[in-house]
Image (tube, grey):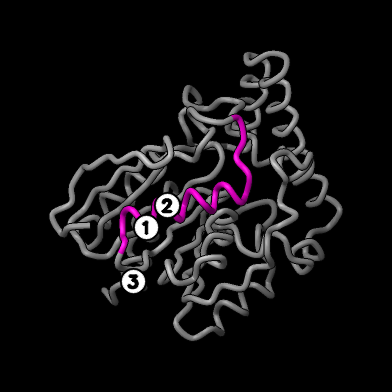
Amino acid sequence: MSSNTTDICITVQGTEVWLQGQGDEVILMLHGWPDTRALWDGTVAALQDRATCARLTLPGFETGPSAISLDEMCQLLRQIVDRISPGKAVTLMLHDWGCIFGYEFAMRHPDRVARVVAVDVGDHNSGALLRSWGTKEKLSVMGYQVWLALAWKLGGHFSEKIGTRMTRAMARWLRCPTDPATITHTMNYPYAMRWFGTAGGFKGASQIQLPMPLLFVYGERKPFMFHSAKWLEKVAATPGSAVQGLPCGHWVMISRPEAFHARVRHWLWGEA
C-alpha cells in the first residue's frame, strides 16, 4: 500500500478490510473470541505512524457464513495479504483464535509473512500444553469451550436468543472487556470446530513451527495458560524472537496497552 494510506476500506470475498496508517510496512491484525476488529482500536492508534495497519472482523463473527473451515480461512487470508501487500510480506498481529488461524496461514504461506506478534495463545495443539494442565484446568477449558460450542449450535438451529444469552453469560463469567451488545452466538463457531468437528474442525492444523521471527506476549494473571513452558523456552531461544509476560489477563492490549504497545514498537523497530 502507499505510504499515504489512511482510512481505506476494501472488500475481499465479502469481508471488509480496513487500512489505516502511513507506513510501508503492513501489519495484518486478527482478533479472536468474542471480539471484532474494534479490539485493535488502541493498537492501530499506537502503531499507525510507522505502519499501515490492516484489520478485519473474522467471517461469521458479524456477517457471512455460519462457519468457515481452516482451509477457507487460510485461502481468504492469502487473498487479503496479496491484495493489501502484493510485493512485500506482512507482519501478522494475532490474538486468541486469531493466533490459531494466523499460525496456520503463516506456516502454509511463509513467503507472505515476515514476522509475527502473537498474544496469549501459543502451542495450542501440543502435547506439552495438554500435559501442563492439571485436572482442574482441563475441566475448566472443556467447560467454557463446550458451553460456547453448544451455544453456537442452539443459536443456529433452535433459538438465536438463547444462544446469544448463553454466549454473553460466559463472556461475563470470563470477565471479557468486549461490549456485550456486540457479542452473539455466531462468534462461537471456532469452538464448534474444535469440539464437534464443524466445518472440518482442526484435524488439519499443523503443530506450531513458525519459520519467521515471533514476539509472544501473554498475560501472567490467568487461571490457566494457553501455552506451555516448553513453548516459552523455545521462542525465547530462537534468534530474532522474544517472549514478554505482562501482569494482566487474556486481553493484554486492553489491560496493559502502554506496556504492550511499547514492547511491540521496540521489537518491530528497535525503539527504546
Describe the element under mark 3 as helix, strand or loop: helix
Q: CA distance from mark 3 to mark 1?
A: 22 Å
Q: Amino acid at mark 2?
A: Gln
Q: Position of residue 138 (x, y in %)?
A: 81, 51
Q: Quadrant of residue 191?
A: top right
Q: Relative to the observer, which residue lies in front, 135 or 119?
A: 119
Q: CA distance from mark 3 to mark 2?
A: 24 Å
Q: Position of residue 94 (x, y in %)?
A: 48, 56
Circle 1 residue:
82
Image point (77%, 37%), residue name:
146
Q: Where residue 268 is drawn, which disc sits there?
A: 3
Q: Amino acid at mark 3?
A: Leu
Left of 110 or right of it: where is 149? right
Circle 2 residue:
79
- Choose the circle earlier in sequence order: 3 or 1: 1
Where is the C terminus found, in terms of image quarters?
bottom left
Q: Magenta region's main secondary structure?
A: helix
Q: Amino acid at mark 1?
A: Asp
